Amino acid sequence: MKKSILASIKVIYTDKTKVVIWLAILLGILSLIIIIFFTISQTREDVRDQLSSEGFGALFFTSVIWIDEHEVEYFDSMEEAMRIYFGSEAVDEFIETIKNEIIRIEEDCYLLLISAVSDRNFFRNHYYIYLALFRTNGNRISPPLYAWFQGIDQFLAGPRARFYDEDRVARDIIWSYAAEHVTVRVNDGVPIYYGTGIGPPPAQISILGYEPDVILPFTYNGNEYFFWYYLDAAHFGEVFAEHFVEFKDGEVEISWLTMGAVIEVFDIQVVR
């Protein structure tokens, strides 16, 4: 009799355990389906009218000083400068990064280097531009004073929605505004407004009725992209500040905004 009761309890316990395990598996599958559905639904939506924190990201990354300019040292090469300050592993990564140079802009004792880089996550490649500002002394060069990444295809953090040409221009206006304090050093005190796009260069890009000084095509990993910039558009920053900048406790903050709002304010037009 005791054996029979014990056996029954064991069977019941085993059955409950199986039920719990199966419920856990089903919940896990359901959660995965929800995550996949949410991701797909997000990537299918236009970014145009979604609120974005891109401005905060731009302010943060372009404000990080890698090297204090008052304590800068000079070296015979970029590789040597990186090795002294960041170690051998950083040098290998850096060499890989500058291998795909898009453009370099120099003035007096400053050099702004812009390259294409990529990173694989969430089962796909994400493409960025890497910007680094150096000081130079003759043929010698410092480690980067500032360095940051910007998305080429979408946002820095990866795909969150569907982008069109005008959305990318709006995104890059935000980053250009945040980087004014860096780019003025290589353009006679005038900030550079710049950005990237996917595919061959369009027939026209227009911001506030002005076309870029340069639209430069480049290829990376077999894909076509283009880089554009304005060298004489300081008023872009004034317009951006008027519409999207707040001052809190003496500090600048870029308000939460949408690409649609930036497109409208700057009358952004891209003609293919």
Image: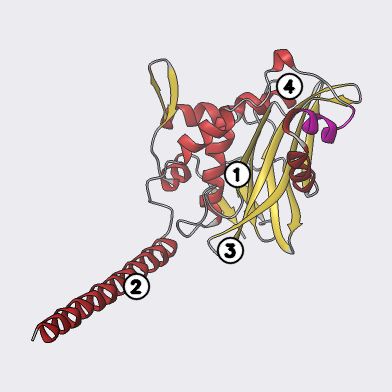
What SS does tag 4 mark? Answer: loop
Q: Main secondary structure of the magenta part?
A: helix
Amino acid carrying mark 1 in the image: Gln
* Foreground of the two, 236 or 246: 246
What's under tag 2, amino acid-wise? Ile
Q: Secondary structure at mark 2?
A: helix
| Numbered mark located on residue 188 in the image | 4
Task: Say whether residue 115 is magenta.
Answer: no
Give whichever of discs 1 and 2 has the lower sequence position.
Answer: 2
Amino acid on which the number 4 mark rests in the picture: Asp
Q: Nearer the viewer, residue 37 or 250?
A: 37
- The reply, left or right, for residue 246 in relation to residue 22 is right
Residue 117 drawn at (x, y percent): 69, 50
- Foreground mark, 1 or 3, reads 3
Image point (77%, 48%), residue name: 96
**Which element carries disc 1, helix, strand or loop?**
strand
Q: CA distance from mark 2 to mark 4?
A: 58 Å
Q: Which residue is mark 3?
A: 124
Q: Is 78 located above or below residue 127 in the figure?
A: above
Q: Which residues are magenta?
A: 76-84
What whole-number distance in Å separates the C-alpha atoms at marks 4 and 1?
24 Å
- Per the rendering, the mark at residue 19 is none
Q: Earlier in the sequence, mark 1 or mark 3?
A: 3
The foreground one among 244 and 65 is 65
Count how many numbered circles sit on residues in the image.
Answer: 4
Q: Which mark is residue 150?
A: 1
Where residue 131 appears, as percent x and y from the top left, is 68, 38
Percent coordinates x, y for residue 180 in the rendering? 61, 27
Q: Is residue 82 magenta?
A: yes
Residue 104 location (% of width, % of height)? 79, 37
Residue 84 is left or right of residue 47, and the answer is right
Label 1 to label 3: alpha-carbon separation: 17 Å
